[in-house]
Image (tube, grey):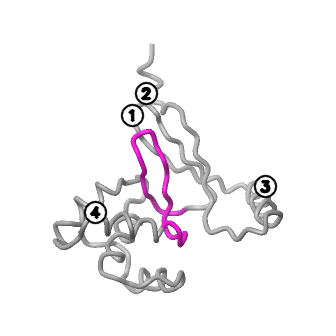
Amino acid sequence: MKSTRPTNELLDMLASRGLAATTQRLALLAAVLDAHDRHVSAEDLYRELSESLPTLSRATVYNNLAALGNAGLIEKLETPEGSRYGPVARPHVNLVCTSCGAIADVLVGDPELERLIDRAAQVGRFQRRSVSLSVNGHCSACTARQP
């Protein structure tokens, strides 16, 4: 799979967080960022990338996803179906359907929310890297199917 992001942009992102730019890490970062409005599982990424990277192991996928998440370059979201990974958009709300597993990112863009987050980080002496809130429930399609 060819990324839509320039390699130098990915290299800059990794360098800004002190991460080495391995072939596997670049490919994983690009795949997660290119997922746009969907969140992918580690297994999805492994299947997608193992064709072009035959030496890629599942352990490498999980270890690199953890490193990218800890660096704040991607977000890890726990769902009823397991962990999913997606791009970091801030601030945003993840709407997670507990029926079908769909995940929608809703950009809030609320200055009051930003101030609240900044104040909480300041009080807690915490340097934030990403912000998301998850709301579990039922999407409109699943709600419409319910009796």
- Above or below residue 26? Residue 102 is above
- Real-space Cα separation, disc 4 to disc 3, in angstroms: 41 Å
Query: Sequence-wise, which precedes: disc 4 or disc 2?
Result: 4
Question: Which region of the structure is painted magenta?
Answer: 69-88
Q: Which of these two is toward me, 63 or 54? A: 63
Query: Disc 3 vs disc 1: which is toward the camera?
Result: 1
- Real-space Cα separation, disc 3 to disc 2, in angstroms: 31 Å
User: Would you say the magenta stretch is mainly helix, strand or loop?
Assistant: strand
Q: Could you say which disc has been placed on residue 58 in the image? A: 4
Residue denoted by label 2: 142
Please state which amino acid type lies under the numbered disc 1.
Answer: Cys
Rendered location of residue 9, percent (x, y): 44, 82
Residue denoted by label 1: 100
Query: Disc 4 vs disc 2: which is toward the camera?
Result: 4
Q: Residue at x 37, y 81 (%)?
A: 6
Residue denoted by label 3: 112
Query: Sequence-wise, which precedes: disc 1 or disc 2?
Result: 1
Q: Which of these two is toward me, 64 or 73? A: 64
Rendered location of residue 15, percent (x, y): 49, 86
Please state which amino acid type lies under the numbered disc 3.
Answer: Glu
- Real-space Cα separation, disc 3 to disc 1, in angstroms: 32 Å
- Real-space Cα separation, disc 4 to disc 1, in angstroms: 25 Å
- Real-space Cα separation, disc 1 to disc 2, in angstroms: 7 Å
Give left or right: position of 123 versus 57. right
Query: Sequence-wise, which precedes: disc 3 or disc 2?
Result: 3
